[in-house]
Amino acid sequence: MTIFAPARPIFSLRSPLVASASIGLRSYATPSVKSVDGQKKISASSPSKTAGRSRARYQFRPPRYYRGPLHPIQPPKPSSPNSREFIPGPFGRERLEDHYHNAIAPDLLTLTYTHLPPGVERTKRDIKQRLREWDDSSPYHKNRPLRGPRGGDTLRLINKPRTFRNVPALTGITVHTMVKGALQDTGYLTVAGMAVQSITGVRTTVCFSKKSVAPFDLRAKRAVSVKAHLKGQLSYRFLANLIDVVMPRIKEYKGVKGTSGDSSGNITFGFTPEQVTLFPEIEVNYDMYPPKMIPGLHVTVHTSATNDKDARKLLQGFGIPFYGKIRD
């Protein structure tokens, strides 16, 4: 009587046309070959289904963990389909983004285009021409570096000649809210984070105070505000929701102040807590937010323009109104 059963052969003799081999944890099948009229043909039961093609024995799989830049096996870039971080898409653009590329961008290029006749060279600006020299009224002025422009120590962005390469475009949107009630009750900060996150669809970031201010009862390193930054399609989606849904529902809404801007192409405007409730994401779940805890918002639209005039033209093309004195 034998204790161990006889081992089975690796290759089966019952099917002489198909031989299966076990290599490691995977099994590979050799396609059956039949000879008809002296010519070799691969049967339809072969795994490749196409003549002359064999299945690759090695299939690359990116490593599950990143083991450092010196490891011989490096994961592919997130844009590669073989990457574990690959996200397919986008398969379409937002309506406002299509409107910008089809209508607004060509109009802005026509309005602000700088034409130079052939053979005319562009004047190159030196940074020394933008700085001021000392009047030598004091002996200490000697060997001092040049002074900055009047009104501030920072130089403004240079307005380059307009071409099709530098047409103003939307680069991002920042939604920020300052929660005063968070100094006494952290629940205000939680409600503000939930509201901003539901409106923007982006994970919010908590901001902390840097200094202590005694009159405001503010201490350093305390959570006082929440912000969210939008890029790409989310920024166009949020701006379209703002222009098409929220602004038309505000009673007697004048628009954005003409003096808004930081002279670098960024426009900021705000909404009161009553106006924030007009967002459809807040209105549909209004019972989830305590009415007295809904905060106001500051919306900063970032553009690639180098001055407020071009940024204002871009936002007017999107449909945002401006009122009052216009400051360029």
Image: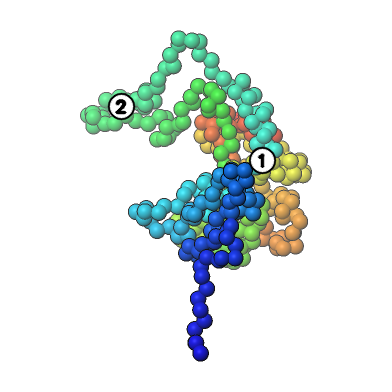
Residue 52 position in % (x across, y down): 56, 44
Residue 134 is labelled as 2
**Residue 238: quadrant of the picture:** top right
Q: Is residue 138 above or below residue 34?
A: above
Residue 283 position in % (x across, y down): 75, 55
154 or 190, which lies in front? 190
- Looking at the picture, which amino acid does disc 2 mark? Trp
Question: Label 2 neighbourhood size at 10 Å, few (<14), some (14-19), many (20+)?
Answer: some
Residue 280 position in % (x across, y down): 74, 51
145 or 202, which lies in front? 202
Question: Label 1 neighbourhood size at 10 Å, few (<14), some (14-19), many (20+)?
Answer: few
Residue pictured at 49% horizontal, 83% vertical: 4
Q: Can residue 93 be seen here?
A: yes
Q: Can residue 212 be seen here?
A: no
Residue pictured at 42% horizontal, 32% vertical: 155
Residue pictured at 67% horizontal, 34% vertical: 98
Which of label 1 and label 2 is nearer to you?
A: 1
Tell me which numbered mark, 1 or 2, is placed earlier along the sequence.
1
- Looking at the picture, which amino acid does disc 1 mark? Gly
**Residue 285: quadrant of the picture:** bottom right
Q: Is residue 129 above or below residue 48?
A: above
Residue pictured at 56% horizontal, 28% vertical: 167
The answer to whether mark 1 and mark 2 are in CB contact below 8 A is: no
Residue at the disc numbered 1: 92
Q: Split into 4 quadrants, where in the image is the C terminus?
A: top right
